[in-house]
């Protein structure tokens, strides 16, 4: 990827999501949470990272097309419906620890905050005093 790639931040967020999820999974195993808990965290993280990857591909295709009418909104709406269906099927038919699953999915939020803090200008946090 080129340094001017508009989706570079999204790729870094996806990688950080996987890192946070892997760390949380390892901590849950070491802490004695069991493999159901660890698997639930890993599944939530994988679903969040996969969702972000799909969004990246849709946006990348939109940028490549160069037209304003590429149907990106309909594709994103279809992706949202697919995500809701996947979440429904997992919650109702797979024996996951629901709180751990959502915690794994929340790794995406933590990774987004991490990326935002990493991209913030260095002097932005210091108010100017007269």
Image (spheres, rainbow, N blue to C red):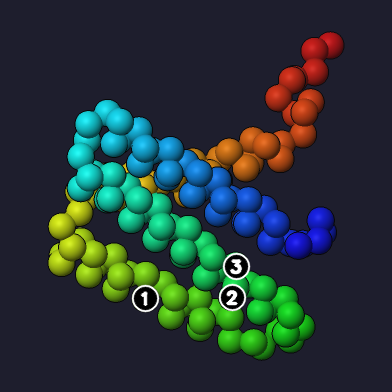
Residue closest to the eye, 4 or 22? 22
Q: Is residue 85 above or below residue 15?
A: below
Q: Which residue is mark 2?
A: 58
Label 2 crowd bin: few (<14), some (14–19), many (20+), radius 10 Å: some
User: Of all residues shown, which one is farthest toward the top?
Assistant: 130
Q: Is residue 102 visible?
A: no
Indicate the position of residue 130 as horizontal and vertical percent values.
84, 11
Tell me whether the residue at label 2 lies in contact with that at label 3, contact meaning CB atoms closer than 8 angstroms. yes
x, y percent for residue 107: 44, 45
Closer to us: 59 or 73: 59
* Residue occupying the point 22% across, 70% down: 89
Secondary structure, mark 3, is: helix
Please say if 8 is above or below 68.
Answer: above
Reading the chain from its start, which is encountered first: label 3 or label 1? 3
Which of the 4 quarters of the picture holds residue 83? bottom left
Q: Which residue is mark 3?
A: 56
């Amino acid at each position: 990827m080129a340094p001017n790639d508009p989706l570079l931040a999204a790729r870094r967020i996806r990688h950080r999501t996987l890192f946070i999820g892997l760390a949380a999974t390892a901590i849950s195993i070491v802490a004695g949470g069991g493999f159901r808990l660890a698997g639930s965290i890993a599944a939530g993280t994988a679903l969040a990272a996969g969702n972000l990857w799909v969004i990246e591909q849709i946006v990348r295709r939109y940028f490549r097309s160069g037209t304003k009418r590429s149907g990106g909104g309909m594709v994103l709406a279809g992706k949202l419906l697919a995500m809701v269906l996947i979440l429904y099927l997992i919650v109702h038919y797979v024996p996951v620890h629901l709180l751990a699953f959502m915690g794994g999915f929340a790794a995406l939020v933590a990774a987004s905050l991490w990326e935002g803090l990493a991209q913030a200008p260095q002097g932005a946090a210091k108010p100017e005093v007269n």
